[in-house]
Image: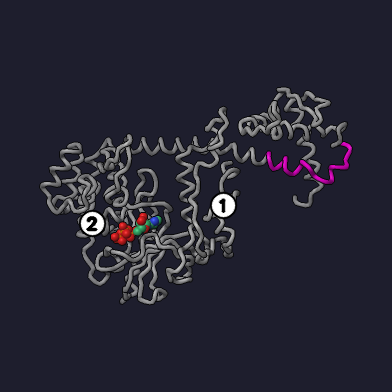
């Protein structure tokens, strides 16, 4: 329903205008050639809620925050590549590459390598994926891709799924590319919590934004990341890269470990014992917990201070978990032990995730009505103002279908006592719902010249519409 007023139809939003230029590929994906420059106007996410009539209940629609988040994801999935980036047009079955991070400027390294993440469209499926490209990597053994095969079998809610890996010369170097499931509008934990943020105005004063990650949020992260690590270890792999810049926040408090499999390929030549790598995962996880709790990526450079800061701001349980993770490796130190330590917190997590499903289901319920109303409006559209009906006596002022015409005026063309149009969405939705239910309530329909009026029930209007529509359907060639 929100599409009715969305700027899509107003045609002044640069983002959507660009969609008119796209080409559909056979798989239905968007082929977006680099766009000519235009002034991009941001989507007004709340556009349809602006002209709320007083009586309008927002229960008719999905919750504003959720809708904004989903629309952002949908918009971000379709952003066109900026012109002049000089990226390959085609890359081993992917096209329309859009960098997900600034290109140029100061760059951090991924281990010993520079890497860039792009969004790209798979030409067979039309689905957007995230491609991580490692620059200047020369594959020495095909067997280095062996771990990717195992990674691609891991489907876990806290792991960004790995699709495939390949090498490419399309960037004019030897690059390693690993394709992952794409999570639009995701940000890294670093971006969400550790990156310095500009102060904002609060209560009229410029104030630094709070950087403390609430204890509750920390526990939800810990449970999810531990769960991911367990799934990976159970598959006979190690994550090998657990870092605030490599854990993605893909929704409210939903985290997923990204970049899996890359280190396995890059470090294939220096193969290490799996048990040692899995122990190293726990230590990296511990360093991440300290970094987030101390709000400092380099917190572990001063361990006593980090423990003191964590202990001051968080519970004893949190401190125990963090200390366990960075404790000396040993054959009995496993991620499973961590679950034993946090016990009932797992139940809190489970409650929260079930509550989240319930909330989403009820949001879905509110959208359920949309389809019903759109179908009803389509019926109206098919029936009303058909030129072939114009000469039919049943639609004339004495015919039985005249009431459909008057009902349409009653729903959509009301005017107030000064003759100004009444644009009241609540009235429309209420009338259409009553019509769909076919209730006995009676309404007065007035002719356009105001010389005659008819008192009919919604039930009667419904049966007129049903019969007019069945006549049309019978005559149509589309069955
Ligand atoms: N699978 C994905 N889906 C959506 N966005 C992703 C995905 N993987 C990474 N990103 C986004 O790409 C951007 C770059 O990711 P990257 O891992 O390079 O982070 P970074 O902070 O730039 O780290 P580095 O310093 O290693 O380059 C981040 O904003 C991240 O949110």
State whether the magenta stretch is mostly helix, strand or loop.
helix
Front-lying residue, 291 or 240: 291
Q: Residue at x 69, y 28 (%)?
A: 418
Please state the total of marks drawn on the protein image. 2
Q: Please say whether residue 399 is one of the residues in the magenta stretch.
A: no
Q: Secondary structure at mark 2?
A: helix
How far is disc 2 from disc 1 in space, using C-alphas? 53 Å
Quadrant position of residue 403: top right
Q: Quadrant of ligand 1?
A: bottom left
31 to the left or right of 82:
right
- The color scheme shown is one colour
**Mark 1 or mark 2, which is nearer the start of the sequence?**
1
* Quarter of the image that includes the N terminus: top right
Q: Residue at x 64, y 38 (%)?
A: 373
- Number of other residues with Cα within 10 Å of mark 2, as a class: few under 14, some 14 to 19, many 20 or more: many
**How far across and how far down the image is residue 476, in percent?**
79, 49
Q: Find disc 2 in the rendering and name its residue.
A: 278
In the image as oriented, which residue stretches furthest toward the left?
304
Q: Is residue 295 visible?
A: yes
Give the magenta-colored segment's residue range: 376-394
Q: Is residue 348 above or below residue 331?
A: above
Q: Is residue 85 above or below residue 376?
A: below
Q: Please say whether residue 389 is one of the residues in the magenta stretch.
A: yes
Q: Is residue 149 visible?
A: no
Q: Residue at x 54, y 52 (%)?
A: 13
**How far across and how far down the image is residue 268, in percent?**
27, 69
**How far across and how far down the image is residue 218, in percent?**
27, 42
Q: Secondary structure at mark 1?
A: loop
Q: Residue at x 23, y 61 (%)?
A: 274
Residue 12 badge: 1
Quadrant position of residue 460: top right
């Amino acid at each position: 329903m929100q599409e009715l007023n969305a700027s899509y139809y107003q045609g002044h939003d640069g983002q959507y205008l660009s969609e008119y230029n796209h080409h559909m590929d056979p798989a239905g994906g968007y082929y977006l050639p680099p766009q000519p420059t235009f002034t991009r106007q941001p989507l007004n996410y709340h556009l349809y809620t602006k002209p709320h009539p007083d009586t309008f209940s927002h229960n008719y629609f999905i919750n504003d925050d959720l809708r904004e988040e989903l629309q952002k994801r949908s918009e971000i999935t379709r952003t066109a590549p900026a012109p002049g980036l000089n990226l390959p047009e085609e890359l081993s079955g992917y096209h329309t590459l859009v960098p997900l991070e600034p290109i140029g400027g100061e760059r951090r390294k991924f281990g010993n390598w520079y890497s860039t993440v792009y969004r790209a469209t798979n030409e067979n499926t039309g689905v957007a994926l995230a491609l991580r490209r490692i620059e200047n990597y020369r594959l020495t053994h095909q067997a280095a891709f062996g771990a990717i095969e195992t990674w691609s079998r891991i489907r876990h809610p806290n792991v960004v799924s790995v699709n495939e890996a390949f090498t490419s010369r399309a960037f004019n170097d030897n690059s390693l590319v690993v394709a992952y499931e794409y999570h639009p509008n995701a940000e890294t934990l670093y971006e969400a919590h550790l990156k310095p943020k500009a102060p904002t105005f609060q209560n009229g004063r410029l104030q630094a934004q709070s950087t403390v990650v609430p204890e509750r949020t920390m526990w939800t992260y810990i449970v999810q990341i531990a769960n991911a690590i367990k799934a990976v270890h159970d598959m006979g792999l190690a994550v090998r890269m657990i870092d605030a810049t490599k854990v993605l926040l893909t929704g409210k408090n939903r985290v997923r470990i990204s970049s899996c499999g890359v280190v396995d390929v890059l470090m294939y030549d220096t193969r290490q014992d799996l048990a040692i790598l899995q122990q190293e995962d726990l230590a990296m996880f511990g360093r991440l917990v300290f970094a987030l709790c101390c709000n400092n990526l380099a917190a572990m450079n001063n361990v006593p201070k980090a423990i003191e800061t964590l202990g001051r701001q968080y519970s004893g349980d949190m401190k125990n978990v963090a200390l366990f993770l960075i404790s000396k490796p040993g054959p009995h130190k496993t991620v499973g032990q961590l679950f034993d330590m946090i016990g009932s917190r797992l139940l809190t997590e489970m409650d929260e995730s079930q509550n989240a499903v319930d909330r989403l289901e009820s949001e879905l319920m509110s959208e359920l009505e949309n389809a019903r109303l759109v179908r009803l409006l389509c019926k109206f559209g098919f029936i009303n103002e058909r030129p072939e009906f114009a000469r039919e006596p049943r639609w004339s002022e004495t015919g039985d279908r005249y009431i459909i015409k008057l009902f349409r005026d009653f729903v959509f063309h009301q005017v107030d006592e000064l003759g100004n149009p009444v644009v009241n969405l609540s009235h429309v939705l209420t009338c259409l719902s009553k019509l769909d239910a076919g209730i006995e309530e009676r309404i007065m329909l007035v002719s356009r010249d105001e010389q005659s009026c008819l008192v009919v029930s919604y039930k009667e209007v419904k049966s007129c519409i049903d019969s007019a529509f069945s006549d049309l359907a019978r005559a149509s060639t589309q069955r």
